[in-house]
Amino acid sequence: MTEIESLLRPNVLGLKPYSSARDEFSGNANAWLDANENPFDHKGLNRYPDPHQTKLKARISEVKKVSASNIFLGNGSDEAIDLLIRAFCRPGVDKVVTFSPTYGMYKVSAAINDVEVKEVPLNTDFQPAGDIGFIDDPKIKIVFLCSPNNPTGNLMDKEKVMELLKNFRGITVIDEAYIDFAKAESWKERLSEFPRLVVLQTLSKAYGLAGIRLGMAFANAELIEILNRIKPPYNVSVLTQSEALRQLENPRNVEIEVRSIWRERKKLSEALLSLPLFATIYPSDANFVFATSPRADDVYSFLLRKGVVIRNRSSIFDGALRITVGTPEENNQIIELLRTF
Ligand SMILES: *Cc1c(COP(=O)(O)O)cnc(C)c1O
């Protein structure tokens, strides 16, 4: 048994995946009479999508410089998070670790799958701190790290991540939804060194396509094969695949928008810093600014009344507000409003 097989849920290890009509035959045909589709053309959408997303993976492979066999595509990275928990964690038995405050979906996905979450608080610099001896618990199957972290905006220290990757025998997931806004190398460059590392990225943030739902998981080929085995066969729609391909024709567009967001992030942070309303404005490697205010709830509802929606995170971190960097006009608007608070 391989290391990864020994971590898998036994039912997943023995699973025979559903073989779709398009799995059994995917060449060229004169007549497709195998999948009970409507034969009349509806802009190509009467046909099921490619279950292996072959064309899209080939393009992502070029853009991200990762071999196609190391790429899983899902209905947002949220699908990859859920599939990873389902593949490795036995309900009511196994556990996952998260470092709080962090992205809420790890906990929700774990709860849906009846998997216990051990929440370890980040230190005052929002870094995983101190002793990681707790990961010796054999029931801990997955550790989720978010870098840059949502909602705090910081990258996780390289040394601490390395310590985890070297010592944890389970699956380490590094969620890099915001990596395109950070001046740091992606952990996907180090996949070959760490066979139990999974790196998550998405088209929802820098790539501007939250609406199409396309998430990517990068990992060693054996792990990717497992995710493919348990995913719903047609999890990425025809529309999503074609729109993603269109956007990836010219990745330079993304760079231009990211540069604007960098400038605006600086402007927004500096403006907030000049207001006595806020206690701390944290440095950000993402497309949002994380700040604390003793009057967080009042600030939040004041902005809401003015039609500006930000994220009130004071329930998970004292006085915390998360403000997404918008267009220059939107940022000017929120800055002006806050000056009149
Ligand atoms: C926004 C976000 C995602 C994106 O999820 P999708 O399902 O791909 O839209 C993933 N992880 C984190 C930490 C996020 O903030």
Image (cartoon, rainbow, N blue to C red):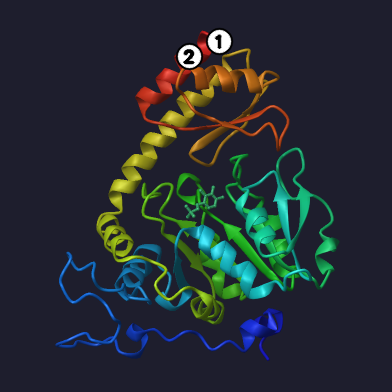
Determine the residue positioned at 41% across, 59% down.
214
Quarter holding residue 235: bottom left
Q: Is label 1's Cβ within 8 Å of ligand 1?
A: no
Disc 1 marks which residue? Answer: 341
Classify 223 as above or below 332: below
Q: Is residue 271 visible?
A: no
Q: In x, y percent, where is residue 112?
A: 65, 60
Q: Is residue 298 visible?
A: yes
- Which element carries disc 1, helix, strand or loop? loop
- Left or right: 293 in relation to 136: left
Q: In x, y percent, where is residue 212?
A: 36, 54
Q: Amino acid at mark 2?
A: Leu
Q: Amino acid at mark 1?
A: Phe
Q: In x, y percent, where is residue 223?
A: 56, 77
Disc 2 marks which residue? Answer: 337
- Left or right: 215 in relation to 61: right
Q: In x, y percent, where is residue 17?
A: 50, 85
User: Looking at the image, do the residues carrying marks 1 and 2 touch, with CB atoms under 8 Å apart?
Assistant: yes
Q: Nearer the viewer, residue 283 or 300?
A: 300
- Which element carries disc 2, helix, strand or loop? helix
- Left or right: 45 in relation to 152: left
Quarter holding residue 10: bottom right
| Residue at mark 1 to residue at mark 2: CA–CA distance | 6 Å
| The N terminus - image quarter | bottom right
Classify 90 as above or below 271: below
